[in-house]
Amino acid sequence: MPAEGAPGGYAPGPDADIAVVGGVYREDCIRPSWHEIYGSAGRAASAMAAMNAPVVLHAYADAVASGVLEQRAVFEGFKLSLTPIDQCVGFEYDHGLATPRVTGAEQSHAPLHVRWSKVVRFGLIEGDAVVHAEKAVYDPQSPGNPVPFGANGSTATSLALVLNAYEAMTLSGSARGTPAREVARKLIESQQAQVVVIKQGPRGALIDDGTSVETVPAYRTTTVWKIGSGDNFVAHFAARWLHEGRNAAEAADLASKATAYYCESRGFATQAVLQADERQSIHPSAQYLGGRLPTIYLAGPFFSLAQLWMVQQARHDLRSMGLTVFSPYHDVGHGSAEDVASLDMQAIRQCDLVFAIGDGMDSGTLFEVGYARSLGKPVVFYSESPEASRQKMLAGSDCDIVSDYVSAIYRAVWAACEL
């Protein structure tokens, strides 16, 4: 919405509209298969439009992305203000928890400038966004080096920061292990924020609005589609806080429910969907909330490159979510049958639960699963090629059988945190 002579190069936005400013990116995932154009801002615009929030999307876009967004905007009911570029950034994932390969990020473009009453701003790869707002929601979208909202000259009379735990610690200058309440307080003081939301995985989200601190839960799903879940949370928080005027804790709780729906369906929740949704929240145990890290036994074959890759992936993802992992390949290695079996069985006795990689129905893995169940240990059994006739004993002994990798990892984490 350019206007000559307007401060910052843009006319002030209508009070009713919300400017969503950020990236529009190509997204490709091998498994589950996914090939779409969304990105943080593109996804947020769709999610907010589904909630009947009036949205104007400000982003860089190449010719292909522009064509997709123009059709989507007409169909979903949001507006566009696109800055043309030669090529959009792309993200290529092996799976939803994998670190993506980023393409097309070599060129940095002149910053977007947006002056609007209500703004949702995401961090960008291919440029920057300088915004001036009455009320703003900011997600830095940076796994390595989150940038403060005002570092590029952006201003907001009332600012809400939505951060993951790492971003919150980094922006606040807090040491690892600092309680989230203390981190949030530092952010309010150092970043001139009125609201801080810190996402904490299965612990839910902590919300500090300057006068009180509350925690809202994460909600359970049968499957987990991870890509874009954080974008969806920000979008629904903003729709509730910016558009509906709800308090920050209520907005965050509704955003958590909407994100659970997104993770389960890959779709954007509407008001009717959320009113009918009665899903259960995750209930971390007092021990887990007190800092105890459950130990998970990683069972699976490691006799080929593909098997070793899978074991390595699962170990990395479980550890990154805060679990202590015992992996026979990493912690015992190859050896005689007597030595390996005794060490592995001892580890199963000492663990809290088992994550089993079951494709191929490896005999050693099945023995480990059976031994764990005989001890009453919970088992999450991940297998993409299930044969019902071969899994009767697994199902009958109450193993949690999951056919999607990312969903299996999350199911293991949720089971662990509730012990």
Image (spheres, helix red, strand yellow):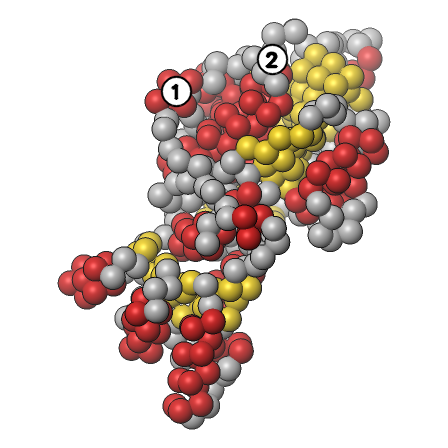
Q: In this picture, is 27 found above or below 58?
A: below
Q: Secondary structure at mark 2?
A: loop
Q: Residues within 10 Å of mark 2 (few under 14, many from 20)?
A: few
Residue named by callout 1: 275
Q: Nearer the viewer, residue 13 or 282?
A: 282
Q: Is residue 341 left or right of residue 124?
A: left
For the point 38% across and 75% down, the residue is 301
x 43%, y 27%: residue: 268
Depth order, front residue of 263/204: 204
Three-letter amino acid code of the residue under disc 1: Gln
Residue 12 is situated, as x and y percent measured from the top left of the image, at 73, 9
Work out whether 306 lies above or below 229.
Answer: below
Badge 1: few (under 14), some or many (20 or more) residues near its Cα, within 10 Å? few
Residue 391 in sight in this render: no
Looking at this view, name the residue that lies furthest to the left: 389
Mark 2: amino acid = Gly
